[in-house]
Image (tube, rainbow, N blue to C red):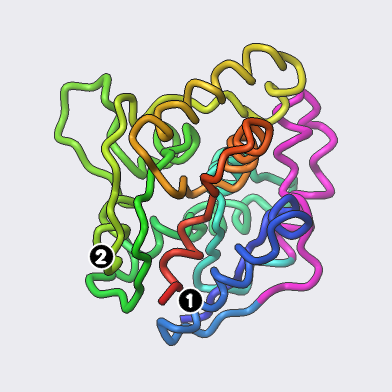
Amino acid sequence: MKIGLFIPCYVDQFYPQVAIATLQLLEKLRLNVHFPLAQTCCGQPMANSGFESLTSGCNLNFINSFEEYDYVVSPSGSCVLHIKDHLHFKGREQESENIKNKIFELTEFLTDVLKIENLSASFPYRVGLHQSCHGQRGLHLSQMSELVAPSFSKTEHLLKKVKGLELVALDRKDECCGFGGTFCVAEEAVSVKMGKDRVADHLIHNAEYITGNDMSCLMHLEGILKRQKSNVQVIHIAEILIAG
């Protein structure tokens, strides 16, 4: 199994430890992992802002970087969903479809492809889980509470296998944090209020850490926590699954 590791640009620039933890986790599971050096932004910021016509270079580069791998794995639900929904390039339609079918968000890959049942990880803290919208409603990493349907969460499934970790119960476990990519720039006040509400839910339940599948959402929450001078920290799930 030859894995292409896709690291989003904001993780590369601001949270390289998440990329390292993802690599270490996959290698710990004895996978053959490669990091294509030519990879860059997937094009999501432009597409979300209404300029999808400007993403052709990103699309072609992504195809050229990842077409040779059996699977493409990334620690970002939003970027994975963007590729699944929007990757295309005229004349490379088949390659685009192939990548769409073999790209996975990290926890999705661990649960659905590798079917992990045992993790030698230890993280003895109270942890609140933020389930990002792209992962939940786009990739179906967890069930939406507004639906009358059986509850599930692939992320919770993995966290419950971590020794010593206490997963706190939130009042509104699948509420949006307000980040929304360019939404937080265009609608700053609304975004901040949503983020404060999300943080408050974790604080009232005495979480020591907030984790999730997307560092973009966690970055938004981290900014609010720092402004409130809170001791609560954010941590990507990959860092937890490799801890101990």
> SS at mark 1?
helix
Q: Which residue is drawn at 51% across and 73% down?
A: 70
Taking the image as shown, residue 15 lies to the left or right of residue 174, namely right
Could you say where residue 174 lies in the image, as x and y percent from the top left?
A: 37, 29
Stretch in magenta: 35-64
Could you say where residue 40 lies in the image, as x and y percent from the top left?
A: 78, 57
Q: Which residue is drawn at 41% across and 38% down?
A: 131
Quick check: marks 1 and 2 in contact, CB under 8 Å? Answer: no
Please say if 28 is above or below 3.
below
Q: Earlier in the sequence, mark 1 or mark 2?
A: 1
Q: Nearer the viewer, mark 1 or mark 2?
A: 2
Amino acid marked by disc 2: Lys
Q: Is residue 51 magenta?
A: yes
- Dominant SS in magenta: helix
Could you say where residue 9 lies in the image, as x and y percent from the top left?
A: 75, 53
Q: Which residue position is annotated with label 2?
A: 161
Residue 240 position by quadrant: bottom left
Could you say where residue 60 lies in the image, as x and y percent from the top left?
A: 77, 54
Q: Which of 203 and 51 is in front in this view?
A: 203
Q: Residue at x 41, y 67 (%)?
A: 241
Task: Give the number of callouts.
Answer: 2
Q: Which residue is drawn at 70% across and 28% down?
A: 48
Q: Does the magenta stretch include residue 1?
A: no
Amino acid marked by disc 1: Leu
Please say if 226 is above or below 195.
below
Q: Which residue position is annotated with label 1?
A: 26
